[in-house]
Amino acid sequence: MHELDEQINEALDILIENETLIGHELRSMLKNFKEEKKAVGYSFGKLCYWHYEAFTDCLNEDIYKAAAAIELLILSFDIIDDLQDKDSDYSWTKTPELSLNTALAMLVMASRTIRETSFEHKSTAIQILEGYALRSINGQQLDLLNTCRDEQSYIQMIEQKSGSLTAMGCLIGEVLAKGETSSEVEEYGKYIGIIQQIKNDIQGLKTWGPKNDLLNKRYSLPIIYLLSQKNDISKSVINYYNDDIGAFLDNNATKNELTNGGAIRYAITIKNVYKFKAFNTLENVAINEVCKDYLKKLMN
């Protein structure tokens, strides 16, 4: 892991070890789940850290605690999301009832961890954490309902579900540094979440298995595009989604249509629209080059 990831990971270890209100079993699960999360890195915590560093003149070491708190919340959401979607092979899916308790503990610990820091503006940071977390939960609810079946409603859903969390990480770092937030940081923060979600949607369709959105009759931008076409493949997919008794889904032909029929290119085009918006907004924010470079990587 890179140095910043290691510092956030160390802060997480300390938080979990020093939590006196949980027993051995819960603590053990928290540690195990955190270890699985460590493998993919702490991108949301890093958003918080880099924005704090970009807007402050004096580094408060408690920023690592704040970053760790955000990662606790994100991990709790990941666990709950996986338990709801039933499309993951992480260890927390093996014992869903116990894992749900662990996720609930993380949610409480996240808010309390920020409250126990020495930052002057920690109350505002907690308001941001709670407000954007609720927006993300509302987006997840819309996603589970599976009713966002056109481009506009789908983008609005992922802006809430994913964009709220990336914006949250950026804004908490900013507010801890200077006591206020800016609309520009919120804007490109949301765009980063939209970009990342579209990338995940595209990648998920490349694996033709139990996690595939199309096979599970879920909606994403490439699928929305495919369903809007007037050809034999789109008609067969519509029949499949409608549970028609005689529906037949030709997997190879459908995969070929997604790849070569414009659906993936369409999703990439929408992603690039938000990449362009995010880049333009970022250029109007006075932050250091290290933070800017990290953000640009997330926008690609």
Image (cartoon, helix red, strand yellow):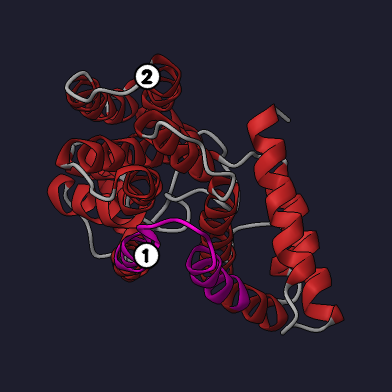
Instruction: From the top left corner, tell me how far across and down residue 87 is, in percent.
Output: 59, 59
Instruction: Tell me, yes or no, if residue 264 can be seen here.
Output: yes
Q: Which residue is mark 1?
A: 133
Task: Assign a secondary structure to mark 2.
Answer: loop
Q: Amino acid at mark 1?
A: Ala
In the image shown, does 92 or 235 lie closer to the viewer? 92
Magenta: main secondary structure equals: helix
Question: Within the magenta stretch, is there residue 119?
Answer: yes
Task: Assign a secondary structure to mark 1.
Answer: helix
In the image shown, does 147 or 260 lie closer to the viewer? 147
Q: 45 left or right of 37?
A: left
Vertical placement of residue 81 versus 294, above or below = below
Instruction: Tell me, yes or no, if residue 251 can be seen here.
Output: no
**Residue under the point 20% across and 39% down:** 187
Instruction: From the top left corner, tell me how far across and down residue 78 is, in percent.
Output: 55, 59
User: Where is the N terminus found, in terms of image quarters?
Assistant: top right
Q: Amino acid at mark 2?
A: Asn
Q: Which residue is mark 2?
A: 288
**Residue under the point 38% across and 29% down:** 54
Give the spatial CA distance, label 2 vs label 1: 27 Å
Q: Which mark, residue 25? A: none
Bin the neighbour count of mark 1 within 10 Å (Cα to Cα): few under 14, some 14-19, many 20 and up. Answer: many
* Part of the protein shown in magenta: 105-131
